[in-house]
Image (cartoon, helix red, strand yellow):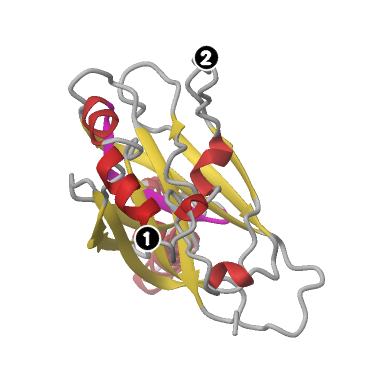
Amino acid sequence: MHSSNQRTCTSLWADTHIFNIQANIIMSKKNLIFIVALVCGLSQNIFALNNQQTKDGKKHDSSTQQNVVELNATHVMDFDFSEKAFQEYKANPENDVEYFYCTQGPECSFYCGCNIGEQKASSTLKQQGKQNYKASNIHDLDYSTTWVEGAEGYGIGEWVEYTLPASNPRITDINIANGYVRTKKLWTENSRVKVLDVEVNGKPFARIHLADIYALQSVKVPHIGYSDRDNFEGKEPIRIRFIIRDVYPGTKYQDTAISEIFFDGIDVH
């Protein structure tokens, strides 16, 4: 629309000046054709310039949206944090009960090199008794804690953002424990995310579609992080923002919860 308006304004300018010229002097047909061609050329250059600005993302977001990857999360494993499951886990002498709710086992993982970083959120549900729902819960590698947004309704548009150092190893997988997974009852009663948008350093990056299942889900993503692993001086931190776009309503509460979003990747070993 912006480019078309400039073309129209330029044409009106040409018509006005041609009228004034004809009123004062008699011009040859050849000169008149030359002036019209000159004006049309100017209009085309303006139109091309505005198209270039639009392609660079200066005018609107449609160009950046073209880079967004649509991803469907895949099932990784079902959750079972019931008392029965805990007692069975505890009865095995090879298990350490401290790892019952952990996203990572005692063996080496991506988190041998991945930084926990810092997390902040657009809103957080008010603490209830000893239970808090702060943003850092979403990346503490503990399934028993959760981030819950604190906005009215289902929290559409609410977000949580990770800030990781530039030296963080590259991320290739995003793992999501969707909902309040500490118990199946809490998971059912609270809302879960259906569509989650991802931005990296302020730019749209991916849209994740999640199934409504009591299970860990995962998506593979284009590498997030710096490929040059030799020098991180002057490079900005990695900011990953997750934005709630649609939800599965809870049976009791509108509050939308995400227990964990953690990563897998490369550059660790």
- In the rendering, at what x and y percent does residue 114 appear? 61, 66
Dot 2 falls on a residue whose secondary structure is loop
Res 203 seen here: no
Q: Which mark is residue 129?
A: 2
Amino acid type of the residue that numbered disc 2 sits on in the rendered structure: Gly
Query: 247 or 27, which lies in front?
Result: 247
Q: Which mark is residue 115?
A: none
Is the C terminus in the top left, top right, bottom left or bottom right quadrant? bottom right
Which residue is labeled 1 in the image? 92
Contact check, label 1 and label 2, Cβ < 8 Å = no
Spatial CA distance of label 1 from label 2 is: 33 Å
Is residue 131 one of those drawn in magenta?
no
Is residue 195 one of those drawn in magenta?
yes
Residue drawn at x 24%, y 25% as measured from the top left: 189
Dot 1 falls on a residue whose secondary structure is loop
Q: Main secondary structure of the magenta part?
A: strand
Q: Is residue 129 above or below residue 175?
A: above
- In the rendering, at what x and y percent does residue 147 appear? 46, 34
Q: Is residue 153 above or below residue 59?
A: above
- Mark 1 surroundings within 10 Å by alpha-carbon count, few (fewer than 14), some (14 through 19), many (20 or more): few
201 to the left or right of 264? right
**The magenta stretch spans which residues?**
190-201
Mark 1 or mark 2, earlier in chain: 1
- Mark 2 surroundings within 10 Å by alpha-carbon count, few (fewer than 14), some (14 through 19), many (20 or more): few
- In the rendering, at what x and y percent does residue 90 appear? 39, 52
Query: 205 or 149, which lies in front?
Result: 149
Residue drawn at x 38%, y 74% as measured from the top left: 30
Residue drawn at x 53%, y 67% as measured from the top left: 106
Amino acid type of the residue that numbered disc 1 sits on in the rendered structure: Asn
